Amino acid sequence: MLKPNLENYEETYKKFRWSDVYGELEWLDGRLNIAHEAIDRHADSWRKNKVALYLERENETSEKYTFLEMKHLSNKFANVLKALGIKKGDRIFIFLPRIPELYISFSGILKTGAIAATLFSAFGPEALRDRLKDSGARAVITNSELKARLYEVKDELPELEYVIRADEKEVKEGEVSYAEEMKKASRNFVVEKMAPEDSSFTLYTSGTTGKPKGVVHTHAAIVQQHITAKWVLDVHEEDIFWCTADPGWVTGIAYGILGSWSNGASSLVYEGKFDASKWYSLIEKYSVSAWYTAPTAVRMLMKAGEELPKKYDLSSLRYICSVGEPLNPEAVRWSLKVFGLPIYDNWWQTETGGILISNYPCMPIKLGSMGKPFPGIAAAVIDEKGNELPPGREGELAIVHPWPAMMESIWKNEEKYKSYFKGRWFLTGDRAYVDSDGYFWFVGRADDVIKTSGHRIGPFEVESALIEHPAVAEAGVIGKPDPVRGEIIKAFITLYEGYAPSEELKENIKNFVKKRLAAHAAPREIEIVDTLPKTRSGKIMRRVLKAKELGLPIGDISTLEEY
Ligand code: ATP
Ligand code: MG
C-alpha cells in the first residue's frame, strides 16, 4: 500500500504557502517553462528511460515514449516552429486525435514560448472557425482526416499562415510536413525561459452554459497543477496514471499532461472513444493504478453493468478521482461495490486552471460533497452583496483571488474577464453551501437552479435521487415555467436496458423521488429519452433541454456531442 502524499489535510491547510511548492520545481534562472517541468527535468534525471507516455491506438496497437524521447521529440518540434518564424505569444492550435503528435507538439509549442491551444478532434468547421478566428491562430497542426473541416473555413482565417500535417509526407502547397520537418530538425533546443505570468496555453470553456470563453493560462499554473496532482490525485512515482479526459478539455491538459508528468508518473492515453469493455481491458493491460475520470463516464460504466468488470483483473487500481460534474452518491456506492474503492470528487473550472476544492485520500468522504478547499485556497459561499454566508445557507461559490493557476485573461475580452471578480472574490457562477464541518456541497450552476413555489432546488440533488431508482441510468433536470408555481421540475431520464418506458414507470419514479426528497423537490414531469445532450467533456447540457422544451433558440452548440 502506498502512503497518501498528503497525510494530514487540516494541519497542512493551516500552514501551507504556495511558495512551499517552488522548491519542487526546477526553475530556469528564476524563470520557468511548463514543458521543462513536465518533461525535460525528468529526461535530465535518473527518470530519463522511464516511460512517460503509454499510448494505445484505436486499432489496438500501442506505443510508448520515455521522458528522454519526449524531450527530444518536443525539442525537434520546437525547432520546426522556430524555423517557421513562430515566436513567443503566437497562438498555435492542435487539431488532432489523441495520438503521440498531439502530446509532442503541445510540449514543443510551450518550449518556444508560443501559446499552445487544443481543439477536440470531433469539432466541426464552425467550432474551428470561431476559436481560430477569435484567437488569431498563426498555425494549426492537424492530419489528413481532419483537415477537410479546417479547409472549409480557412478563407475566413486571414491570420492562419501554416497548416502542419502530422501524418503525411506528401503535402499540398502551403502546408508543412510534420514528418519531413521533424526529420531535419535538431533534437537540441534551448527552452524559452518564461516569466511566471507569461501565457502558456489557452483553452475554450466547455460551453455548458453558453458560448465558450477563450481562457488564457500562465506558466506559473504548473505550481498548482504539480501540487494538486500530488495531493489530490495522489500521483506517485510508481503510478500508471490514466486521465480519461481529452486534451480538448482543460482536465486533459492540466492533469492528463502537465500535473502527472511533473510528478514523474507514467501516463496512459487511449486514442479511442468510450467503451466499457475496452476501458476495463486498458486498466488490466497497463495495470492502471491511479485513475482520473468524470461522472458521466462512471454512469456509463454503471450502465454497462456489474458483471462486465468481473471479467477483468482490475486489482492494480488503488485510487480513483472524478471531476467535471457533481458526482452522484450512487456512483460512489457503485464504485465501492465494483472496485472496492470510493471515488474522490474534486471541483474546478477552466478558468481556475487547477483543482480548488477536493476530497483527499487522508480525509473521510461525505457522499455527494466535493470536499474542502485545497491548501492555499480560501473558498466561501456568498450572497449577492459579497457577504459570506454561514454553514447551511446556499449562495454563490466564491474564491479569494489570486492563486497560481488562475487564468490570466479571457482572450480579447477584458470586460468578460472583469466580470469574474467582485472585490476580493472570484465568482464561480456555481451555487453551493458549506456544512458545519467545512465540506462544500454543489447545488447547481446559477442558471440551472430551479425556483418552485418559493423554494430553490438544485438539479443535482433531484438528478442524484432519480438515478438511485433501479430503472434510471441518467437524469437531467430543468425548471419549466409554470403560472402558479413559478417553475415546475421537469426531469429527462434515460433507462437501463431491460426497462420499457411507461406511464406506470414514470409514476413509480416520481413516488420514489418523493420519498427521498421533500415533496416539492420531486419532478412533476418526467420524459424518457434515448440520450441526454452533453458536451464533449461529458457534461449534461441542461440549457439545451430547456431550450428544446420551451421552443427557444438553442444558442451555441459547438461543443455538443451529437447534434
Ligand atoms: P461554460 O463555462 O462554457 O458554460 P463549463 O462551465 O462546463 O462550460 P468547464 O470549465 O469545463 O466549463 O467546467 C467547470 C464547471 O463544471 C464548474 O463551474 C461546475 O459547474 C462544473 N464542475 C466541475 N467539477 C465539478 C464537481 N466536482 N462538482 C460539481 N460541478 C463541477
Ligand atoms: Mg463555466
Image (cartoon, grey):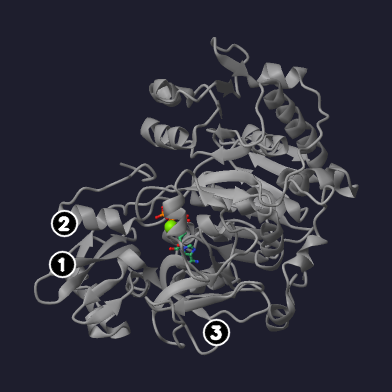
What is the quadrant of residue 486 in the picture? bottom left
Residue 216 at x, y percent in the picture? 55, 48
Residue 137 visible from this viewpoint: yes
- Disc 3: residue Cβ within 8 A of ligand 1's nearest atom: no
Q: What amino acid type should be assigned to the residue bearing mark 1?
A: Pro
Residue pictured at 46% horizontal, 87% vertical = 391
Q: Which mark is residue 550?
A: 2
Residue occupying the point 39% across, 33% down: 124
Which secondary structure lies at badge 2?
Answer: helix
Seen in the picture, residue 287 relative to 426 is either above or below; the reply is: above
The image quadrant where one finds the C terminus is: top left
* x and y, in percent, of residue 323 in the image: 52, 62
* Res 244 seen here: no
Q: Amino acid at mark 3?
A: Gly
Where residue 495 appears, x then y in whole percent? 30, 61
> What kind of element bears circle 1?
strand
Which quadrant holds residue 73? top right
What residue sits 20% from the left and 62% below the top?
527
